[in-house]
Amino acid sequence: MSALWHGFADMGAVERDGAFVIARGEGAYVYDQSGARYLDATAGLWFANVGHGRAEIADAVAAQLREIAHYSNFGDLAEAPTRELAERLATIAPVPGSKIFFTSGGSDAIDTAAKLARRYWHQVGRPEKTIVVGRERAYHGMHVAGTALAGLPLNREGYGELMPDARTVAWDDAKALLALIEEVGAEHIAAFFCEPIIGAGGVYLPPEGYLNEVRRICHDAGILFVTDEVVTGFGRIGGSWFASSRFDLRPDIMTTAKGLTSGYLPMGAVFVAPELAEPFFGGGVWWRHGYTYGGHAASAVAALVNLDIIERENLLAEAARLERTLHEKLAPLAAHPRVAEVRSGLGAVAAVQLADPAEAPAFVKELRAQGVSSRAAGQGAMQVSPPFVMTDAQVDELAAAFTRALG
Ligand code: PLP
């Protein structure tokens, strides 16, 4: 028995079977309390892009904590590492001249984006543009706006109406967005939210041309285009910092978190295109929004060192290598009768879709017994989104463990 209430858990089962307690990590491995070693198939919850146990980040954060942990970024207050990080992010932003609004994590980033989209239209004299559109299977975090926007009905159950003017369209068909525009009118739609790769909803890759098509539709209709790159950002897409850069999507707003610090400390960042920020920067306008820990100085230091490591070790290229390796080495698993399909081929992400999603909880334990820590996304999609430092030999090890666990 433990006092800890886990997220996304059947707590009765956790109390019955016990918790899987991770004590340590190094590179692409994590270790439990008994010292047993597991390949980290998921980079924690999609965040440990540079791998675990980086003393360099720990030391830099400790030095910052000794100076001051955090003060504030409200009003005219700011902190040096936070300012430096914003400048650095602006240089890699998919839209040049972007402004950076810091949050405590991904859900805050989504809430910030949803509020900013509506507030922007209000600011420019179009307050009737309030509808925010998401997609089926999408996951946008667990705050009220993100839960309402996302396309996972189970996550919305039991709360009543979470947020007015949230609509959902098919995840893979740009015509569904056109149909919604036809139905409600572009003059009522504030923004369209889009994960370049559906992550927590089960790892679904966008159909060829889909992202550019919805981008064009939004642009033509005067609807803000928001990319949720909480998962795909900071290299996970492979070869580029962001999917928005790889596909030249020029988002009006881009949300990020996770890989920003590789999870060493919590932090999110919302990238805002200059045209959208402009009405708030002219003087005399307040945006009454912000989080106590937005731009936390120690988190900013973790992010800066994380970016240094990604650049120094060419980890964007390593993620591109993993895109190819995961595709090649996991493909044979699709032949197993317990596997429905393997989804891979874009970014350092893949899913081994179990034929029977009900088997997922047991399969997670079978995988652990074979030395791999993974989890089920969506409906029985075993997540493979490793740290970028996972070698091809370790991917072989991972695939072999899957084969043994499948039996
Ligand atoms: N958006 C996406 C695409 C995510 O995958 C997640 C988390 O998994 C979030 C938003 C929410 O981020 P957080 O859990 O840091 O609040």
Image: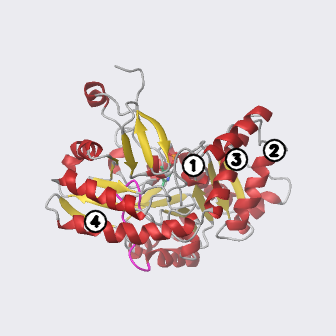
The CA span between labels 2 and 4 is 46 Å
Return the residue nearer the eye: 276 or 101. 101
Q: Position of residue 77 (x, y in %)?
A: 83, 42
Residue 214: image tag: none
Residue 342: image tag: 4
Q: Residue at x 16, y 63 (%)?
A: 336
- Dot placed on the residue nearer the N-terminal end, 2 or 4: 2
Q: Which residue is mark 1?
A: 111
Q: Which residues are magenta?
A: 198-209
The CA span between labels 2 and 3 is 12 Å
Q: Position of residue 14 (x, y in %)?
A: 30, 30
> Neighbour class for label 1 at 10 Å: few (<14), some, many (≥20)?
many
Q: Which residue is mark 2?
A: 78
> Which label sits in the foreground, 2 or 3?
3
**Does dot 3 land on a helix, a strand or a loop?**
helix
Three-letter code, disc 1:
Asp
Verify whether residue 221 appears in magenta: no
Residue 300: image tag: 3
Q: Can the viewer see residue 187? A: no
- Dot placed on the residue nearer the N-terminal end, 4 or 3: 3
Three-letter code, disc 4:
Val
Three-letter code, disc 3:
Ala
The CA span between labels 1 and 2 is 22 Å
Three-letter code, disc 2:
Ala
- Dot placed on the residue nearer the N-terminal end, 1 or 2: 2
> Neighbour class for label 3 at 10 Å: few (<14), some, many (≥20)?
many
**Does dot 4 land on a helix, a strand or a loop?**
strand
